[in-house]
Image (cartoon, helix red, strand yellow):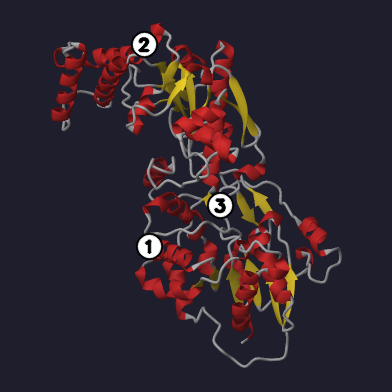
Amino acid sequence: MEFPKEFFLDEVREGFYVPAMMKHAWAAEIEILFEIDKICEKYGLHYCIDYGTLLGAIRHRGFIPWDDDIDIMMMREDYEIFSKVANSELPEELSFCSIMDDKPNYELVSHVKHNKMLVSSEALGKYHNYLYGAGVDIFPYDYLSTDPAKEKKRMELFDALCILASFPSIHGKNKVVLEMEAKKVEKLCGVDLLSASSYRKKLLQLLHNCQINFESDNQAKVACLLEMKLSKDWKKGIFNKEDFSTNNFLDFEFLSLPAPREYLSVIRGEFPDYDVKQVAGGDHNYPIYKKMEAEYMKGIGGKLFYQYSIDRNELKARNNTAFFSHKKGIATEQKKSALFLPSLYSHWDTMRGLFEAASQDKTMKCFVMPIPYYFKDGLGNCSPAQWDFELYENEFGKNSPYLLDFKNFDLEALHPDAVFINEPYDEYNLSFMVEPSFFSKKLKHYTKQLFYIPWFVTSEIDIENPENGKAIVNAENYIVMPALVHADYAILQSEMIVKLYRGILEKESGKEYTKYWEEKLLPLGNPLSDERPIEENSVAKKIWSHLRKMIIE
């Protein structure tokens, strides 16, 4: 499936930073969903998106920014057919897995997933060079009894059977608890599991029968029993069968995906406050690739090719050579020069207000030099160079004295007093890279002061608040990066964000560099946080008022 190249770029959605690796994971999951869709089409099976994926389609027209998987549902009759034919129809790199499998599998949620990490798989390209295994969760819906007493008994039995099925046997460190659950089963349905000759087989048969217990009654109410158990709410998520009888189609990223006929009724039943955006904490083993990434790193004995390592010797050298150069000197009448080096025009917004403020300063000569960039394929390979010069030319006007063509200037000879960049990565990003001659590690040689201001602004992230767990995990993708080492200063949006940066950078470099980061990280704000027109952007003016003293003096 063809994806727009821009889809794979790091992005801030709803104030939440989504890294390139997550974009590749999303793309791999969409490819798996496409394989599921082909099987359903062939066998006339009905499915639709559900849970977080349905919520994402309704609220975000795509993935929830802080979600990392795809959820779909099937009615039991469709699910049973799918489970029988899936593994013979899926491509060899994928498998359908459920708790009912003969092979050892103790996960309650059914899914189609990759058989292994894709690092060395021939199928890697098909899944957009996502290095790790992805999957799509499938939730079967079953009929509920109209008799509350019968349903209550079924739910108690289902709960006990799920607990037992989550372990390979009754023996081991959980033996006492599991034996209690087995006795519950005996009391509820008269089957002595502890004495069964084939314990696991009998257990799974009971579990299956429990789920389909009221299928023959063909009742109007349906629910996903597993989700009711996982949410520990046996009254939540009960729907009319007709809610799922036919599909609506909802926009999802650049696709259109099948959704329940009454999708608003369904989402209200699953998420009563669905229109309230809440970023969940760092649970759910977020991100989905975290564990596999750690295993891969352990296997190679170090960081991966897209992960930047701060060189403490380099920090030490910079720290000992008066890296920070804003000490007062004798001001001269000669104008100082400031050079802004944007790349992607869509990232220019963070610099535009600052450039406007600087260019109105009579003590400065200010220039914008758009630089080339490359899209990357997730493995380090680059597309042909891209250059957004025409877009900048449309804004500034042709032959603007402020706009420079990088092909006509020698940066070393130009040697501006200050250079501003807004991309932190150098080569350490899966999907994007500026022209190597403009890497931050090189730019410091061509200017007296190098300033980094992020191309994005996020929601505030309090490192003391567990609810920010996912945002903190993703922050490493833009904090432990070359620009934070090579720039003289990083201009950040707030004191709270500075605290986040310091915590992550100190963890990477060691506590002995606490003062180094304190001096480098400036909580001056970000022009993107001020939505007023450029000429009224008080944040940009405030930043420039502070920086001009450092440049001129």
Reading the image, the residue beneath label 2 is 214
Q: Residue furthest bottom?
A: 330
Q: Dots 1 and 3: beta carbons under 8 Å?
A: no
Q: Residue at x 71, y 51 (%)?
A: 385
| Residue at 48% over, 57% down | 308
Determine the residue positioned at 56% across, 44% down. 379
Q: Is residue 340 visible?
A: no
Depth check, mark 1 against mark 2: the one in front is: 2
Mark 3 sits on what residue?
Answer: 429
Q: Compared with residue 304, is residue 253 higher up or lower down, i.e. above or below?
A: above
User: Which image quarter is the N terminus in?
Assistant: top right
Instruction: Look at the numbered disc 3 and give the secondary structure of its residue.
Output: loop
336 vs 459, nearest the viewer: 459
Marks 1/2: CA distance?
A: 56 Å
Q: Which residue is mark 1?
A: 507
Lower sequence index among marks 2 and 3: 2
The picture places residue 430, in percent across and down from the top left corner, at: 56, 48
Q: Mark 2 or mark 1, which is nearer the start of the sequence?
A: 2
Residue 228 - label: none
User: Is any part of residue 15 visible from this angle?
Assistant: yes
